Amino acid sequence: MTSTVPGKRARRRPRGAQRPARRRTARRYLVRRWTVLGSLLAVTGLVVLIFFTPVLGANTVEVTGTKDLTADEVRAAAAIEPGTPLATLDTDEIATRVRQLPRVGSVDVSRSFPATVELVITERTPVAVAVRDDGTHLFDAEGVDYGTVKATPAGLPVLDASGDHSTRAATAVLAGIPPQLSGIVVAVTARTPTDIRLTLVDQRVVKWGDARNVPRKAAVLGALLTQQGKTFDVAAPDFPTIS
């Protein structure tokens, strides 16, 4: 037995009325499809533009921070192929190539869109010199022999060290002492890394010892230099001596 609800009849949509709805659904589907396809094409085009064309390529290499080096020397060492897409540049590799220049202490490589590579150079600063047959060698705070000049720069102490370890210890001391002390040092000797000696402008000698406790030793020495004596021993700064 079939029951019906009094007063209500099932309504059916005419066949002709269903067609516009289907067309609207089809149009919405096509619009979404073309929107997705258009987005994919746009992204693909952007990727190609950035990574595979010279439009956003390295057309300019800016160099700042140089003193003794020239910008062209840095550009040559960087060896950046003109037009190389900025996005594909290996900045670490570029920095490694530039650091091969002896005078370069550090380099910062960055991209500046749309078409510039920026190289910021920090050159090494000499703290001592060594006079040899081929000229005057410059040494920085890390004990690196990074350059040779014909004329000895004024105001830098002469270094006499035996071996790389002794050289690094001596230059670390020179880099760490205050300007008022470094300004009166005319020579530094290091027979071993623990036997560093400073010669002052008035020929007084400072037995410095090793490269540890530089600020403490410098402070003690400053007080000792007000007293009479020819040799000042601050190797053990808590027990300094004068002779």
Image (cartoon, rainbow, N blue to C red):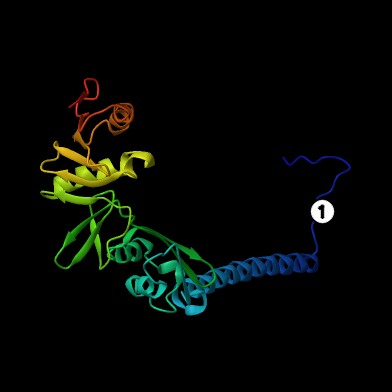
Tell me: 241 left or right of 80.
Answer: left
Nearest to the observer: residue 170 or residue 26? 170
The image position of residue 242, as x and y in percent, is: 20, 26
Quadrant of image for the N terminus = top right
The image position of residue 134, as x and y in percent, is: 16, 68
On screen, residue 240 above or below 203 = above
Q: What amino acid is found at the position of numbered circle 1 in the picture?
A: Arg
Residue 240, quarter of the rendered image: top left
Q: Residue at x 52, y 78 (%)?
A: 55
Tell me: 57 left or right of 32.
Answer: left
The image position of residue 84, as x and y in percent, is: 42, 75
Nearest to the observer: residue 32 or residue 213? 213
Q: Residue at x 77, y 68 (%)?
A: 20
Quadrant of image for the C terminus = top left
The image position of residue 229, as x and y in percent, is: 22, 29
Q: Residue at x 79, y 41 (%)?
A: 4
So how many labels did they put on this image?
1
Q: Residue at x 35, y 66 (%)?
A: 94
Nearest to the observer: residue 191 or residue 105? 191
Looking at this view, name the residue that lies furthest to the top. Answer: 239
Residue 110, quarter of the rendered image: bottom left
On screen, residue 215 above or below 198 = above
Tell me: 234 left or right of 18.
Answer: left
**The residue tagged with tag 1: helix, strand or loop?**
loop
On screen, residue 57 above or below 17 = below
Nearest to the observer: residue 2 or residue 129? 129
Residue that carries the numbered disc 1 in the rendered image = 11
Number of residues whose C-alpha sits closer than 10 Å to that of mark 1, classed few (under 14), some (14–19) or many (20 or more): few
